Image (cartoon, grey):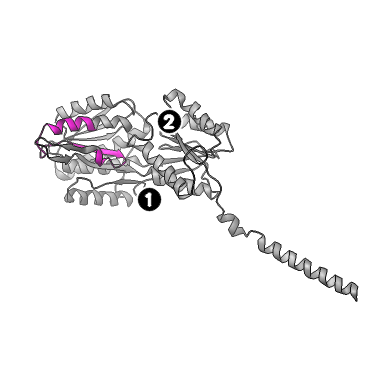
Amino acid sequence: MKLNKKFSLLLIASMIFLSLSACSKPTHEDQTNKKLTNHIALISDTNGIKDNSLNQSAWQGVKNYGTKNNLVEGNKGYNYFVPKDPKDYQATISKALDNDFSTIIGVGYTLRPNIIKAAKNNPKKNFVIIDTHASKIKNLASISFKNQEGAYLAGVAAAYTTKSHTVGLILGQDSKEMDSFKAGFTQGVAATSRKLHKHIKVLTQTVGNFSDANKAHDIAQEMYSKKADIIFQAAGKSGQGVFKAAKEVNQANPVGQKVWVIGSDEDQTKLGNYQAKGGQPANFTLTSVIKSADVAVEDLANQTAKGDFPGGKNLNYGLKNKGISLVQGNLSYHTWIKVQKAKQKIIDGKIKIMVDR
């Protein structure tokens, strides 16, 4: 009898233990929803994270992710590294690796070969390259943008706004990525010119890099002297020289006789603030083509934290998924409506933009 009683107590205790074990075991859903620790390093190009352009936008995305996930800024959470020279790209990536970051993001196509090399040599780390396509490597993802779509809308805006029938385009370097800006802008101007039964001339020149603001300034000065009244700049930090040239022209004239700049990558409205002749405050940033690198980076970081790093894939952003946009800025209401109509036609596939390479 006592033996049966002891057996019964032992059986009950075993059942309780098994029940508690089952309750404490994580479900598949718990395991799926559990976030991984994702420490991120951003490698900018030599222009740094305050370039009012792509580096700054990408860094904002990293900061947004870090803040929302209670990570500290620094080598224990999220951080940025700025190489002093393109020759230092590989060493800068190595520095980030030495600090044990789990995801390393390179900004700009000039970093592409270095990021690819690092990804091949460090298969247990995640790598991302922004603004270009990358090789299909399991631990490497790329974020690219349909630059031609935003540039086409900039061309439409410029064609409707110009009074001199001459506009300019200043690019950073001769590359496939820059070709997409040129294709979009020139085709946007040409298509709108035909609608308006006008001949609008497009002056185009390349700086040679993304950090020579002085050279971009001189190019812009020459274009303004050739009667261009709008310049679209897609030149990274070099583009600040275009704003400087426009400011010099505009400060010497009444507010009604201004030349314009179309910004790129970020909303560059603030760079167009100035005082016209007579002291009147004004602004000469006509509009800006925005690449939402901040949104793209934050999205990718969240995917990675859930264990879904998109290795081997290219995430392509354009007008349709709101990765590219154009701000209204100083565009007239009439021009803004025309831009919106062109935007919808691009999304619907009714406008095709041809890029040579």
Q: Position of residue 273 (x, y in %)?
A: 20, 38
Determine if residue 357 is in view: no
Q: Is residue 234 found left or right of 45 in the rendered image?
A: left
Amino acid tagged 1:
Asn
For label 2, the crowd category at 10 Å Cα-Cα, with few meaning under 14, some 14 to 19 and many 20 or more, is some
Task: Identify the residue at image location x=61%, y=58%.
Answer: 28
Q: Quadrant of residue 233?
A: top left
**Residue 187: x, y in percent?**
26, 39
Residue 73 located within the stretch drawn in magenta: no
Measured in 3D between alpha carbons, the distance from the residue under mark 2 to the one under mark 1, in whole angstroms, is: 30 Å
Rendered location of residue 235, percent (x, y): 31, 32
Q: Is residue 345 left or right of residue 41?
A: left
Q: Quadrant of the C terminus?
A: top left
Q: Which residue is mark 2?
A: 82
Give the magenta-colored segment's residue range: 243-270
Q: Nearer the viewer, residue 131 or 24?
A: 24
How crowded pointer 1 is (Cα within 10 Å; few <14, some 14-19, many 20+) is rated as few
Residue corresponding to mark 1: 321
Q: Residue at x 31, y 25 (%)?
A: 212
Callout 2, which amino acid?
Val
Which of the two residues, 134 or 296, is positioned nearer the viewer here? 296
Residue found 59% across the figure and 38% down from its top? 124
Coordinates of residue 336 in the picture (x, y in percent): 21, 49
Q: Which mark is residue 347?
A: none
| Foreground label between 2 and 1 | 2
> Element type at marker 2?
loop
